[in-house]
Amino acid sequence: MAIVPRRGLRIDLIPRELHIVLICAGGAMLAVQANVTLPVAVLMGFLLSVRVRIRRI
């Protein structure tokens, strides 16, 4: 999946090879330990589950 927000920049979102259960458990533990709100926990879970690659074209 590639997102191209402006000319000359390419952002690739690549799913990680980990099992979704491990990712969810890690995100839930992080949210509980850090005592954060739901939007922050969802964002961190998303960032843990994908690899973001930014390149110039």
Image (cartoon, rainbow, N blue to C red):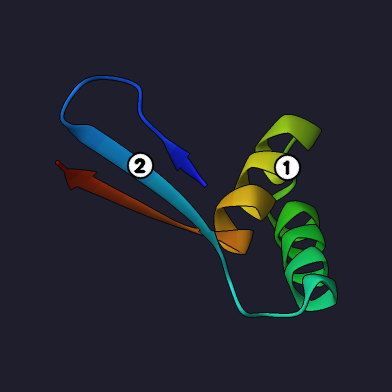
Write the residue at 73% across / 60% down.
27
Q: What type is the residue that disc 2 sits on?
A: Ile
| Element carrying mark 1 | helix
Q: Nearer the viewer, residue 19 or 6?
A: 6
Question: Does residue 29 appear left or right of residue 3 in this picture?
Answer: right
Q: Nearer the viewer, residue 38 or 35?
A: 38
Give the labeled residue for mark 2.
11
Write the residue at 55% across / 52% down.
47
Relative to 37, residue 28 above or below: below
Q: On residue 25, which mark appears?
A: none
| Element carrying mark 2 | strand
**What is the x, y in percent for residue 33?**
73, 60
Answer with the quarter of the image where residue 19 lies.
Answer: bottom right
Write the residue at 35% across / 22% down.
5
Relative to 35, residue 25 above or below: below
Q: Nearer the viewer, residue 23 or 50?
A: 50
Q: CA distance from mark 2 to mark 1?
A: 20 Å
Question: Does residue 9 appear left or right of residue 44 in this picture?
Answer: left
User: Badge 1: few (under 14), some or many (20 or more) residues near its Cα, within 10 Å?
Assistant: some
User: Badge 2: few (under 14), some or many (20 or more) residues near its Cα, within 10 Å?
Assistant: some
Q: What type is the residue that disc 1 sits on?
A: Val
Marks 2, 1: nearer the viewer:
2
Give the labeled residue for mark 1.
42
Question: Does residue 44 appear left or right of residue 39 in this picture?
Answer: left
Residues at circles 2 and 1 in contact by the CB criterion of under 8 Å: no
